[in-house]
Amino acid sequence: MDLVDWKPEIPGGGRATASGGGFYHVSVRSGSRASGSCASAAHDYITRSGEYDDPERDALVYTESDHLPSWAEDDPREYWDAADLYERANGRLYVSADFALPRDLDSNDQVDLAHAFAEELTADERLPYTLAIHAGRDADGQEHNPHAHLMISERQNDGIARSREQWFRRANSAHPERGGAPKSRTFHGREWLEHARERWAALTNDRLERAGRHERVDHRSYGRQGVDRKPSQHFGPAAAHMVGRAEAHDRLETAAAAATDQDRLQALEQAIAELEAAREKLVREAMERADSGRAEDAPGARGHGQSRDDDASLGR
């Protein structure tokens, strides 16, 4: 499959409906060993701790963590370090969301808004998370793009006491206390992503209204809003990858030169979504093939199909 030319129809968008601080941006991706991710390093990066405690970096404004097991309540990094150590090889370490915060809200409102979104995504299943807000200052030290990073674990805190190692084992639906924390299956599919983007827009607009601001955001693209505006030139995932590697690319340079800042970010977000959808599909297919092979090899398995342990209690 050629990722340069592949263009799946993934809902994109995220446009301001008024000028000023009503700028919309949400991107969601996952971190796994297969993709080279490290949960503890990601935690250090967003919380500006460890090797990322550097005054030259964009400043940390606020951080919080919630729904953690008791052994990590005093030090959230313990949780993400344990995920690196004990989460199974083909499991996701975390799901991350990055989202822009309206510049026209004061810092307290920005914190309240980011917290509300974190709870929106995690409260029902009590999923452990770490939230961090960065000032988003430009080279001159002016606040330019305040934004938040959210790391979410898919391991549900069901209230059963477990050690670090047991927490990340396969769940046991018959005897939950003997298995690991059950895994959420929430963060999969186009519909969930669309719902999350819509909820962020709704929370943002509610906060803007309560602050007496007239700006509003819309999670839909210009086309879906019925706005007659020519989009910027599309460039594919391969070009977006080259942005991260600081490599030249003719199509990317042409598109970037002609687009506004919002259009460039929207195109990058679309590219990330396309890559993430492709990766999720490949991982899911590989896991299904592996599970099928184990079921066929297991004694007495033929005619008595067994589901994956950490899916059993979720009724897939």
Image (cartoon, grey):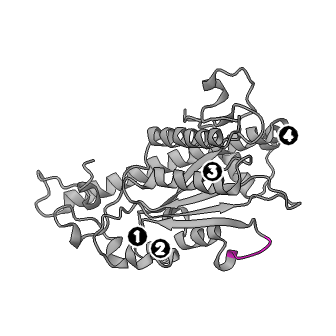
Residue 244 coordinates in the image, percent (x, y): 72, 56
- Of helix, strand and loop, which one carries label 4? helix
Q: Are marks 1 and 2 in contact (CB under 8 Å)?
A: yes
Q: Quadrant of residue 90?
A: bottom left
Q: Which residue is mark 2?
A: 84
Q: Quadrant of residue 203?
A: top right
Mark earlier in primary sequence (4, 1): 1
State the residue in front, 270 or 120: 120
Q: Are marks 3 and 4 in contact (CB under 8 Å)?
A: no
Q: Secondary structure at mark 1?
A: loop
Three-letter amino acid code at disc 3?
Phe
- Determine the residue positioned at 60% across, 66% down: 63
State the image coordinates of residue 118 (x, y, percent, origin top left).
51, 55
Residue 99, numbered label: 3
How far apart are labels 3 and 1 at the CA level?
A: 26 Å
- C-alpha separation, residue under disc 1 versus residue under disc 2: 6 Å
Mark 3 Cα shell of 10 Å, populated few (<14), some (14-19), many (≥20): many
Which residue is denoted by mark 4 in the rendering?
257
Measure the C-alpha gap from mark 3 to mark 2. Answer: 25 Å
Q: Kindly indicate whether the residue at mark 1 contacts the one at mark 3 (C-beta within 8 angstroms).
A: no
The residue at the point 41 percent across, 68 percent down is 89
Q: Position of residue 284 (x, y in %)?
A: 40, 51
Position of 253 with respect to 311 (left or right) is right
Dominant secondary structure, magenta: loop
Q: Is residue 223 left or right of residue 18?
A: left
SS for dot 3: strand
Disc 2 secondary structure class: helix
Q: Give the residue type at disc 1.
A: Glu
Q: Amino acid at mark 4?
A: Ala
